[in-house]
Amino acid sequence: MPPSAPAEPARSDGLIGSALVRALEIPAAEPPEAVAAERQGWFGKLSTGLRKTGSSISQVFTGGTIDDALYEELEAALLMADAGVQATGWLLAEVKRKVQTSGATRPVQVKNILAEVLTQLLQPLQKPLVIGAHQPTVIMVAGVNGAGKTTSIGKLTRHLANEGCSVLLAAADTFRAAAREQLAIWADRNTVEIVSQEGGDPAAVSFDAVTAGRARGKDVVLVDTAGRLPTQLHLMEELKKIKRVVQKADSTSPHEVLLVIDGNTGQNALAQVKAFDAALGLTGLIVTKLDGTAKGGVLAAIAQEKPVPVYFIGVGEKLEDLETFNAREFALALLGP
């Protein structure tokens, strides 16, 4: 079944960070030049980052005819890009249907049709992060070790600060001293406050941070949690405890539960989304390290099997290398020129 189009996000004059609640619309089946001027620089970085994934797919359309061999090569390329069996099957069926109804005769036309279909599949993942409906907006961030969680929190803090939001960081990864130090560095860089305790209970730190955020009138409280594998059941239970304790500090929170996933892990990233969603009820994703990976198609698998919104994607280590997700941009960048 094709994915349904997402509803337009609710708008309110009380929202903070308008850039984070403004969806970018790019006309279907138009060249990359159609990307909004303010996004051109980002689109270039995204295209470069996804080149390893997209090159194998783009090569499928270099022939002169549309035949069974082309579709077989496309299927293989999508599977190699970790789009997953379900998403690959749906994409192929839709591409074939549109090729037949449109009367397309050249492979390049099939590529344009794939861009449309891929955008349609990814569209439900394109949802804005809304700040301001609650004060503070409490955002709990989870992820496995090495996914880039703490760095992504630092970059997200910069995004929020640039939009005029006051942010308080909670260093609830109390087991790894380097995590607290790393988060403190990001707090200094972004000139934001941080709540931290050496060796303290992660849930207690989170409770104190939410309480402090309310008392100080902060717009956002970002809670960093210890990296863990979903198979580490005792650590997953700790995450659930953090969520329960945060709710005691503010019964409406956490307002967002984000999972940071490494784009290099392919289908394993989808497994992480399913496991963390079952434990915590995810509201959004941050996908990191898409640069240099041949597995960028995993977003198609997520869209087909577990469509949790993708708020941000990252293609590098710099602050500007994390940006809001746009389905059309991603499809165009993935398929290349």
Image: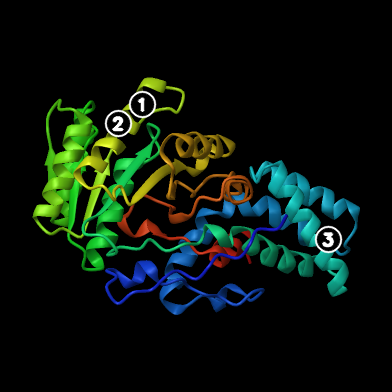
Give the residue at x 56% y 50%: 307
Residue 74 left/right relative to 172? right
CA neighbours of label 3 inside 10 A, class few (<14), some (14 to 19), many (20+): some
Residue 243 image offset from top left, x and y in percent: 30, 38
Other residues around mark 1 within 10 Å, as few (<14) / some (14–19) / many (≥20) = some
Q: Which structural element holds mark 2?
A: helix
Proximity of marks 1 and 2: CB atoms separated by less than 8 Å: yes
Numbered label attached to residue 96: 3
Which image quarter holds the C terminus? bottom right
Q: Secondary structure at mark 3?
A: helix
Q: Amino acid at mark 1?
A: Glu
Q: Position of residue 206 (x, y in %)?
A: 20, 39
In this view, the mark in front (1 or 3): 1
Image: 5 above or below 312: below
- The N terminus: image quadrant: bottom right
User: Could you say where residue 144 lies in the image, as x and y percent from the top left?
Assistant: 40, 33
Q: CA distance from mark 1 to mark 2?
A: 6 Å
Q: Residue at x 63, y 54 (%)?
A: 54
Q: Residues within 10 Å of mark 2 (few under 14, many from 20)?
A: some
Type of amino acid under label 3: Lys
Q: Is residue 77 shown left or right of residue 18?
A: right
- How far apart marks 1 and 3 lie (CA) works out to 46 Å
Image location of residue 70, percent across then percent down? 84, 54
- Is residue 105 visible to the viewer in this orientation of the structure? no
Q: Secondary structure at mark 1?
A: helix
Name the residue carrying label 2.
Answer: 241
Q: Which residue is mark 1?
A: 237
Give the foreground label among 3 and 2: 2
First in sequence: mark 1 vs mark 3: 3
